[in-house]
Amino acid sequence: MGFRALKKDIRCLLVADDFQTALAAFDHMAERQAVNPLLSFFYDTDTVVRWHAITAFGRVLDNLARKDIESARVVMRRLMWNLNDESGGIGWGSPEAMGETMALHAGLADQYSHILVSYINPNGNFLEHEVLQRGLLWGLGRLAQVRPERLQTAVPFLHPFLQSHDPIHRGLAAWVIGALQDASARHLLKPLTDDNMDILFYFDLRVQSRTVAKFAEDALFALIDT
């Protein structure tokens, strides 16, 4: 199947009313052929298409890693290259795709989770693009929900995002901190319980609205026993 035909078929899956069921179709695709069309949807103007593409990409790369780990590493390095200044692009969707993939595949998380952390480390490979940072925080949060032990070194670098002027930064940082059970952030989370800014949040395969206050409250609840 040619690229255009495959891309058309993939888009139909990404916009399916029952996306949970549509996801299963990606298990029957040739992984290497599916990578490029899915990457192209990271730049789609339709928010749902973009997020579903990230979910499907993680599934495809997880499948590829189970068959050919070196080929999966090549794709992970491609995502990293997209976030490199020398790439000439911005790398939309790349940190989210890295987080999604590593949430699904433990081996890739072992190898690349420290890279994701380095993107919020001022002394590491810090990403300065504020909108790209939103995707990075989501990617960290997605991984933290499944493998929090891989991200403990991220804790001190998350605190500044709780005080960001960007409500998406504040909300997503609180989400990550709750998953990592960072008790040292309590004093930064408490003021956010009065922050009623609404943000769009992709979770459980759908885009939903949630306040920063709700993120902060959930994080504080996760810290009750710490």
Image: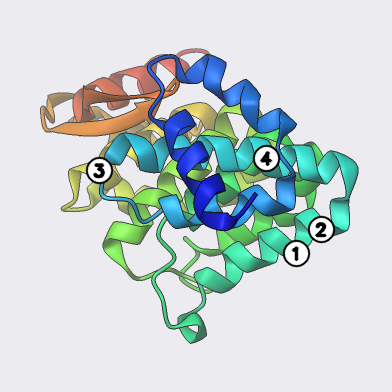
Dot placed on the residue nearer the N-terminal end, 4 or 3: 4
* 113 horizontally vs 63: left or right: left
Label 4 crowd bin: few (<14), some (14–19), many (20+), radius 10 Å: many
Q: Is residue 10 above or below residue 4?
A: above
Dot placed on the residue nearer the N-terminal end, 3 or 2: 2
Residue type marked 4: Val
The quarter of the picture where residue 116 lies is bottom right
| Residue 32 numbered tag | none
Residue at image mark 3: 168
Q: Nearer the viewer, residue 72 or 116?
A: 72
In the rendered structure, are the residues bearing label 1 and label 3 in contact, judged by CB atoms less than 8 Å apart?
no
Q: Residue at x 41, y 76 (%)?
A: 89
Residue type marked 3: Ile
Judged from the image, the secondary structure of the residue bearing numbered disc 1 is helix
Q: CA distance from mark 1 to mark 3?
A: 31 Å
Q: Residue at x 63, y 26 (%)?
A: 25
Residue type marked 2: Ser
Q: Is residue 196 above or below residue 152?
A: above
In the rendered structure, are the residues bearing label 2 and label 1 in contact, judged by CB atoms less than 8 Å apart?
yes
* 135 horizontally vs 214: left or right: right
Residue at image mark 2: 71
* 49 horizontally vs 71: left or right: left
Residue at image mark 1: 74
- Number of disc labels: 4
Label 1 crowd bin: few (<14), some (14–19), many (20+), radius 10 Å: few
Q: CA distance from mark 3 to mark 2?
A: 34 Å
Judged from the image, the secondary structure of the residue bearing numbered disc 4 is helix
Residue type marked 1: Val
Residue at image mark 4: 60
